Image (spheres, rainbow, N blue to C red):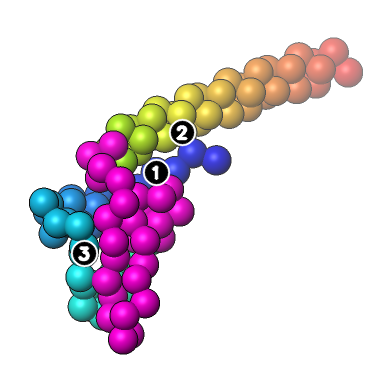
Amino acid sequence: MAVTLSSREKKQWEEIKTLAQNNDCLCLDDADAIRMKRVLDLLQEQGYIKNLDVDGTNMFLVLGNLHDFDDWLTDQEKQSKLLNLREWAIAIISALIGAVIGRLV
């Protein structure tokens, strides 16, 4: 399944990139960690960051080049658009077949 980010999540992603710029660690307060949870989870899932368990803080170790995540995200969005087009094509063809069968019966 292709992953896409909402416009709000894209803004959060840009904020994370800015906060992590030239740092090996990313520290967030509780409110930001909750607000950015989906984006942080996706970054962890893809191996770009790792959650560090340090006295209940929201500290993340930056493992990969975060700019590579932009490329991955762009590829995922393209894949999602292709899947959407494919689903529309299947739906239209199915409707046409159904209409033809309906006329014949």
Name the kind of residue labelled 2 in the image.
Answer: Ser
Relative to 58, say whether 25 is above or below: above
Marks 1 and 3, how far apart in space?
23 Å
Number of numbered discs: 3
Q: Amino acid at mark 3?
A: Leu
Q: What residue do we see at 45% from left, 53% from top?
A: 45
The residue lying at 21 percent from left, 78 percent from top is 29
- Sort mark 1 into few (<14), some (14-19) or many (20+) by Cα contacts within 10 Å: some
- Image x and y of residue 3, in percent: 44, 43
Q: Residue 73, percent across and down?
A: 35, 38
Mark 2 vs mark 1: which is more N-terminal?
Answer: 1
Q: Can residue 60 be seen here?
A: yes
Q: Which numbered disc flags the more N-terminal residue, 2 or 3? A: 3
Element carrying mark 2: helix
Local packing at callout 2 (Cα closer than 10 Å; few below 14, some 14-19, many 20+) is some
Q: Which residue is mark 2?
A: 80
Q: Secondary structure at mark 3?
A: strand
Image location (x, y in percent) of residue 76: 42, 35
Q: Position of residue 93 (x, y in %)?
A: 65, 18
The residue carrying mark 1 is: 4
Instruction: Identify which amino acid the numbered label 1 is placed on.
Output: Thr
Residue 15 in sight from this viewpoint: no
Magenta segment includes 44: yes
Task: Kindly report the distance in space between the C-alpha atoms of the residues bearing marks 2 and 1.
Answer: 7 Å
* Secondary element at image label 1: loop
The answer to whether residue 95 is left or right of residue 88 is right
